[in-house]
Amino acid sequence: MKYMKRTMTCGEPRATDAGNTITFNGWVHRTRDHGGIHFINLRDHYGMLQVVVDQDAPQATKDLAASLRMESCIAVRGTIRLRPENMINQEMATGEIELAAQEIQLLSSCEVLPFMIEDETSTREDLRLEYRYLDLRSFGMQKRIALRNQVSFRVREYLQGQGFMEIETPTMIKSTPEGARDFLVPSRLNPGSFYALPQSPQLYKQLLMVSGFDRYFQLAHCFRDEDARGDRQPEHTQIDMEMSFVERDDVFEVVEGLMGHVFSNTIDVKLPAEFPRISYHDAMNRFGSDKPDLRFDMELQDFQAFVPGSGFGVFEGALEAGGCVKVLVVPGAAEFSRKQITDLEDVAKTYHAKGLAFAKVGQESLEGGIGKFFNDKYSEICTAFKASPGDLLLFVADSWKVATTALGAVRSRLGNQLGLIKPGSFEFAWIVDFPLFDWDEDGQKWEPAHHMFTMPRQEYIESLESDPGAVKGDLYDLVCNGYEMASGSIRVHDPALQQRIFSIVGFPQEEAEKRFGFLLKAFKYGAPPHGGIAPGLDRLLMVMCGAPTIREVIAFPKNTQGVSPMDDCPSPIDAAQLQELGLKFTEKAQADSSAAADTPAAE
């Protein structure tokens, strides 16, 4: 098909182009007829242009303009002219000019739209995902995907400038499941054997350090077969990095420089040269989260000193059981209704708290809730916690982990609810000194808090076996605005130390050899000290955009059930393909598959 090819994009023309004859290609965003004069908002990836079909335009042009449907793809040739001064649109980059159309060519017509193409839309997400190619036409999605491209470019620019080499690792690897389940790929040439899609390039990037490449990175596509969760995807992209001959501070310096470079060159935000460091214990104790939102204050505080002799049995019982009592001072929230407090209590109970106690700070006493038990210490409490009349005190009494986590969730809810968060702000921090091991009550054994290849902090290596619970790992998380942006660690490179860690978590030598033998073998050939980190690209973009979910920054995401409504993926395969792979479904598997297909996607 021969068509009028554009000589300029819709976002380009300015007042200096007045009088020029130009051809544009794009989509009909909106049309309107004002007494025989047709106005068309023409849109492409680069912007919007007002096209005017005057009464003296050729009849064929007027007839076609009158028949155009929204989102039809057209070519338009005409003359740029200045708009009357009272018709200038300051909100459009091209708002000073318009195109007087002389000829219009219909390149492709459009059926009735399932939803309007807007800057942003309130359309149901399942419908947006079914027609994702239409949803991607919106300026909001266009901007976010364009930002993704810019961020990816700046990541490569910075890391290569720092001496990193981009190296691709395999997409079909050996299954070594830890945590999430692997996506498995049957091997036709090796019946009964399976590849796995990588949950991360972890083992391969460590092998690259053994190979002497020193500084590696890639924008790695990773896959995790997790149960449905609101803000997770079965596949994601991470900025994967590994470095030899480094310590923790060296990794921090690279990542801080990377984030500063990306933010300043994409969204024009200047970040501090160094991010604050907070120990895991302090983060939990002060904010109730190991990924604290530092955009607002309102820290958790210890209330234990005021409990003895109060007569309030719930708090006294918690302390006798070895627990704690945490308090949160909510400024100006004494006017909260009982329903509002109950809603916050429901948040706390979600995190296993037995309840959420409260008291309102009056002019001379604590009012409501449990206030009467502590009125004799009114002045001391107000002084200790910097509470003022009109404030609300919220309490959780339980084990330290439950009390901090539950009240931390309440804090996060209030930060949004009370408008305490400054829009467009970014507060990064490093969370350090995580426990290396967690105690599994159900299995009555130690398990790795992150993964089994993390180096213990030097001061704990001698006491690994005698006191695993006290051991801190040389691992770290990068957090921003309440999200974990990256996780990393200094790795074990000594086979003997690795075997000690395997033994503590009850990982049999035979199983270790079966799963990780190739890595342990490599460590016997002069493995260098090394460490790394892997910021999640999708979550980074979500935070930069202020988007509600990572699905807003991925071109073709799955829904919360791991399904793509657009192309009906995943889908069954035919019997011939199954036979070729030597696979057969049981009746139960087929029934489970059918039930999953019938489950509606969550919004």
Image (spheres, grey):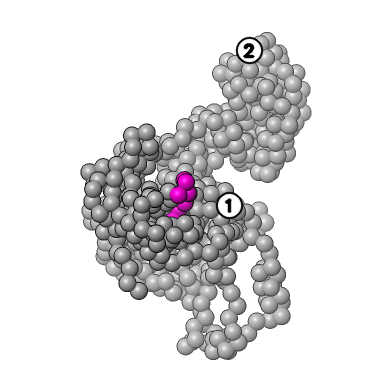
Residue at the spot 60% in from the left edge and 78% down from the top edge: 572
Q: Is residue 89 visible?
A: yes
Which is the main secondary structure of the residues drawn in magenta? strand
Q: Residues within 10 Å of mark 2 (few under 14, many from 20)?
A: few
Percent x, y for residue 146? 37, 53
Q: Is residue 221 magenta?
A: no
Q: Residues within 10 Å of mark 1 (few under 14, many from 20)?
A: few
Task: Identify the residue position indicated by label 2 in the image.
Answer: 379
Residue at the spot 59% in from the left edge and 74% down from the top edge: 571
Q: Is residue 244 above or below residue 391?
A: below
Q: Is residue 34 magenta?
A: yes
Q: Is residue 194 above or below residue 292?
A: below
In the rendered image, the quadrant that contains the C terminus is bottom right
Percent x, y for residue 63? 44, 60
Residue at the spot 33% in from the left edge and 68% down from the top edge: 3
Percent x, y for residue 255? 34, 48
Mark 2 element type? helix
> Of the residues shown, which amino acid type is indicated by label 2?
Ser
Magenta stretch?
Answer: 27-36
Task: Identify the residue position indicated by label 1 in the image.
Answer: 123
